[in-house]
Image (tube, rainbow, N blue to C red):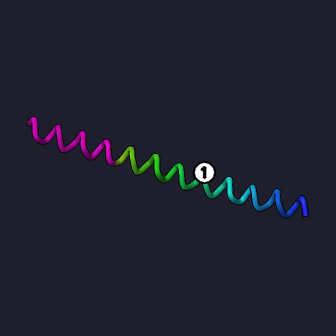
Amino acid sequence: MTRKVLIAVGIAAITFTTTACNTVKGVGRDIESVGNAGDKAIH
């Protein structure tokens, strides 16, 4: 029983970590695209 709980918690942690990484990458891309658009508007 304990082993199953630990496996489930481990899988959940990996899933949340992967989701968080994708979210951070997406935010980084959004910020970069806004910076590029602002740079193009200035030049």
Q: 20 left or right of 9?
A: left
Q: Position of residue 30 (x, y in %)?
A: 32, 48
Q: Residue furthest right?
A: 1
**Residue 39: in magenta span:** yes
Q: Which amino acid does label 1 sit on?
A: Thr
Q: Is residue 23 inside the magenta stretch?
A: no
Mark 1: secondary structure: helix
Q: Tell me the residue at 27%/46% (across/down).
A: 33
Please provide percent x and percent y for residue 5.
82, 60
Quarter of the rendering occupied by the C terminus: top left
Q: In this view, does 8 lie to the left or right of 39?
A: right
In this view, 20 is above or below 43: below
Residue 2 quadrant: bottom right
* Residue in the picture at 74% in, 55% down: 10
Image coordinates of residue 14 in percent, x first then y, are: 66, 55
Of 15 and 2, nearer the camera is 2
The residues colored magenta run 30-43
What secondary structure do most residues of the magenta stretch adopt?
Answer: helix
Q: Nearer the viewer, residue 21 or 3?
A: 3
Residue pointed to by mark 1: 17
Apparent side of residue 17 relative to residue 3 in the rendered image (left or right): left
- Circle 1 residues within 10 Å: few <14, some 14–19, many ≥20: few
Is the N terminus in the top left, top right, bottom left or bottom right quadrant? bottom right
Residue positioned 38% across, 44% down in the render:
28
Q: Residue at x 13, y 41 (%)?
A: 40
* Position of residue 29 measured from the top left corner of the image (x, y, whole percent): 35, 48
Residue at the far top: name it.
42
